[in-house]
Each structure stands twice: as structure tokens, then as C-alpha cells.
Image (cartoon, rainbow, N blue to C red):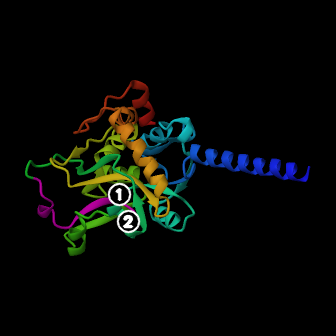
Amino acid sequence: MKYTYQFILSLMLVFFSLASTLTSLALPANDNLRFVINAPGSSPYIYFDHEKSSYRGVVVDFFESFDDSDAFNVKYIDSSRARNEKLVMSKEADVFFGSAIWLENPKKFIYSNTIMPHVSYIYSTKKFQEQFSLNAHNGALICTRHAFSYPFLQPYFNDGKLVRVDSSSQKSIVSMLSKGRCDFAIMSEENARGVMFDSEFCQNEFYQSPIPVMSDEVGFIINENLTQTRDNINQQLLAFINSGARDKSIQKHLKSRVFPKRVCQQTADTALSAEN
């Protein structure tokens, strides 16, 4: 009887060990993912939708594209550009969205493959000359985003040929540009299309420089210990892009808008409201 009991106990231990192994194989290496965001984000990447009280964007669509069997349980956490880097380095968070060239400590992270390009232009309230050059605008004020790095413009800032004017958000950049508080603004085309066509700037015209000034590759910036998370993300990124789901997501979160942005046609009610 004693040996029979020990035999049954041994079988139970083997069974539970096998069940635990199978369960661990069925789940990703890190199924809980703490994703920190430079709140409130920006379209089309990831942005806060006040009507739905939740984050939306290409990033959200990407994580929702995983099969249930290997999906991450993503927790989106409001943060800031500077804090994102510190939180992920200290393991208080797992991942954020951006580009390696924007970081203070790029060697402290691992990176996913690129999800999409991030192309930046110079914007103005006046039409650009075809041969536009920043060298011809010595001392011009450039509206920029606080804590963002701009490698192309940094030599101009260092030499005093251009003056950096920081703002807290993309919307405040456009607001300052519209009020003449800076001569130019630098923004990604996606951000510019997402903000400059807002009804708040209905009576403003905005122009885009003839050629881009920066082109960065953006993706997921991950804690250096989460190699399996990086590999899982890369595998799904390949399917997300090749299936056309990424391009559909971009179009969904970014309306078809082209520059120059003209003064819009207001309805009678909107015009009356503006006058009051």
C-alpha cells in the first residue's frame, strides 16, 4: 500500500509538471506588457480618444492583431518622453514607441523591427520658395516639441542660426505657429496632418516644405532583458505589414489630407459660434 501511494504521488507530480510546461509553452514569454506613452500620444501611431476614453492608433491595432493564444495583455500607461526611457530602463515598464536616435541611452534597450517611417517637414503659414533653405533664415524661431531631439536641426541651434522654441504638445506647436510666435515648425507629416486640419485652425493656412528634413524609422523600444517579447513582436509585425493591415490602420487613423492646408469652409452655425 505504501509503495502504491508513492507511485500515485509520483504520477501526480509528473502530471502537474507536464501540465505546467504545456501551459508555459502556450503563453508568450511575457504576456503582460506595460506600455508607456508620451501622453496624450499622436495620430496615427497611438493617441487618446476622448470619446471612447481609451487609446487608439496603429500601435493598438497591432497588438489587437495577435491571435488569442499568443496575445499580449497590454496596459497603456500615461507618461512623458523623458520618463518613458527611465521607466523602461528601470523595469518599471516594458516598452514604448519611438526611434533609437531620439534616446539619451540608446544602447540600454533592444528594438523591434520598423513598423513605419517617421518623415518630418518644416511647416509655415506662408508659401515656401521652391529652393527653400534654412540657411537663408538666420535667427528664425522654430517651434519644437519639448524633450524631442532633432539631429538635422541641432547644428543650427548650436550655432545660433536658428532658435528653438519648445512646446508641450503637437497642438501647442501649431497654435504658436498660427499666432506668429515662431517662424516655422518642425513636425512629422502624420502629426501635421492630424493637427493642422483640426477645426480649431479652420481660419489658418499651413504650408509644407518642398522636401522633408528628417526621416526616422520608428518601432517598439523594449527593456533589454525582454528578448522573447521582442521576437514575438517582430514575428507579428511581419504578418501585420505583409497582410496590408498596417496600411489599412494608418488610413483609418489618419484622414486623407494634403498640403497646403487652406482656410476651410465654415457652416453658418460654426461661423456664428466663432464670432461669439
* Horizontal side, residue 248 vs residue 141: left or right: right
Pinpoint residue 259: horizontal percent, then vertical percent.
23, 39
Tell me the number on the disc at residue 6.
none
Pinpoint residue 114: horizontal percent, then vertical percent.
33, 49
| Residues in magenta, as a range | 132-147
Question: Which residue sits at x=28%, y=58%?
Answer: 182
The number of discs equals 2
Farthest residue, direction top: 268
Dot 2: element: loop
Within 10 Å of the Cα at label 2, are there few (<14), some (14-19), or many (20+) other Cα atoms?
Answer: some
Q: Is 29 above or below relative to 110?
A: above
What residue is pinned by disc 1? 99
Residue 224 on the magenta segment: no
Question: Which residue sits at x=20%, y=74%?
Answer: 159
Pinpoint residue 69: horizontal percent, then vertical percent.
56, 38
Q: CB under 8 Å between callouts 1 and 2?
A: yes
What residue is pinned by disc 2? 103
* Horizontal side, residue 171 vs residue 64: left or right: left
Pinpoint residue 222: horizontal percent, then vertical percent.
45, 58
Farthest residue, direction left: 131
Question: Which residue sits at x=86%, y=48%?
Answer: 4
Q: Amino acid at mark 2?
A: Leu
* Horizontal side, residue 220 vs residue 133: left or right: right
Q: Amino acid at mark 1?
A: Ser
